[in-house]
Image: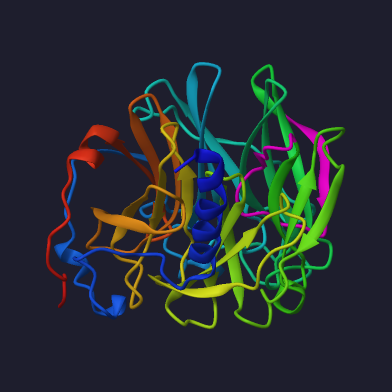
Amino acid sequence: MNSILLLPLLLAASSAAADSTVMLAGPWLPANSHQMDFTALPRIPSEHAIISNVSASGGLPARLDHAKGGVNQHNYLVHHDGQFWAMWSDGPGIEDRVGQRVKYATSTDGLRWNPPQFLTPVPPNSGPDSPHYGTRTDKGMRWIARGFWKRDGELLALASLDEAAGFFGPSLELRAFRFHQGTWDAAGVVCDDAINNFPPLKLPSGDWMLSRRRHDYKTSGVHFLVGGVKALDDWQSFPVLGSASELKAEEPDWWILPDNRLAAVFRDNQRSGFLFRSVSEDQGRTWSLPVKTNFPDATSKISGLRLSDGRYVLVSNPNPKKRDPMTLAVSDDGLVFTKMLYLVGGRHIDYPHVMEHGDSLFIAFAGGKQTVEVLKVKLSDVDAAKMPGRPLTK
């Protein structure tokens, strides 16, 4: 058939797939994906490193002696200027309490890391000498790591700042820092009343886009910010209608499909145990009503990526009962994933961020919310892994 005549059929098929509940498929998948034996998934070789570990640290104030060393999570990676960079949230006690800051580290190979250093300053009036340090209260502030942004040849680091009482405070801001002569200098506010999940990604239109949750996102839902070209703070905000009514949308990720549409995926804090998906046909201005897919999820953060060869990978915690194990799923079209591989498990693991560099994937994650770790996985090993021909039931 003539390729011009075939194109509408392909687009129609792709559109139908976007509205489908199917996001995971294969003879190895049980009819109910929650019944999968996740420990039976194929395993692939990897190299492992620990960037930071606060599980054994001491010296906390007496009122925080229950905190067991502090928190490390919200991990992000990037490769820039010949080296790897990692950032994460580092704070006292349980995650996102008063006084939490952002740290970073660098590496030449992604496996041997230099000692961590602070990226953000002490949050206003919320240092270790504050009576509110390490607590949950609106009388203190906290930083949360939000990823690296490579914009116009320079490296920016993003972090949110707000009150530490809940999620999130009314003064919520997304801010940028610029690396200069060995230190991170404030570069300004990227967006008021906004926290993203991953750094901006460039659209086919040339605009940047990133997700946005406002401080009242539990009722206002998820938005996407489009712009960022003329200035750091030049954005338009577009809601994903239904992301507050159809599900309790959390921590979205998104990627560009082969036909230049956009697919966004959401965790569901109503604990359905499945990922939801929405599609935009106009570069993020409007979005389809989120649909519950058959892709299982532990109500945990996910990280997806379109590879340089056009395929897609998604790192997540698919076991609906706990954040264990962490897996890597592979898709040809960005809509249906047909391979799922076991990466690491046997313990609490979450907050992944995956990036591609050279012939490998680098995946940062948190262990028990107290370690920042990274896996290096060769793409050739991903390709060589074969899925079973029968359902992996428990």
Residue drawn 77% across the image and 47% down it: 226
Left/right of residue 37 with respect to residue 281 in the rendered view: left
Residue 4 or 329: which is nearer the viewer?
4
In the image: residue 247, left or right of residue 360: right
Q: Using the rendered image of the protein, determine whether residue 185 is visible from the camera's viewpoint.
A: yes
Locate residue 380, reporting x and y percent. 23, 33
Pick the residue in front: 167 or 258. Answer: 258
Give yes or no for residue 190 being in the magenta stretch: yes
Considering only vertical position in the picture, is 298 above or below 353? below
Q: Residue furthest front?
A: 1
Q: How many marks?
A: 0
Q: Is residue 325 left or right of residue 216?
A: left
Q: Residue at x 58, y 62 (%)?
A: 251
- Image quadrant holding the C terminus, namely bottom left
Q: Quadrant of residue 213?
A: bottom right
Q: Is residue 214 magenta?
A: no
Q: Would you place residue 72 above or below residue 138 in this image?
A: above
- Locate residue 295, reporting x and y percent: 39, 69
Q: Residues in magenta? A: 185-206
Q: Quadrant of residue 200?
A: top right
- In the rendering, at what x and y percent does residue 228 appear? 80, 39
The residue that appears at 69% across and 77% down in the rendered structure is 242
Residue 49, percent across and down?
A: 31, 38
Q: On the image, which quarter does residue 240 sit in?
A: bottom right
Q: How has the structure been colored for display?
A: rainbow
Q: Is 13 placed above or below 371 here?
A: below
Q: Is residue 53 visible?
A: no
Closer to us: 188 or 23: 23
Q: Quadrant of the N terminus?
A: top left
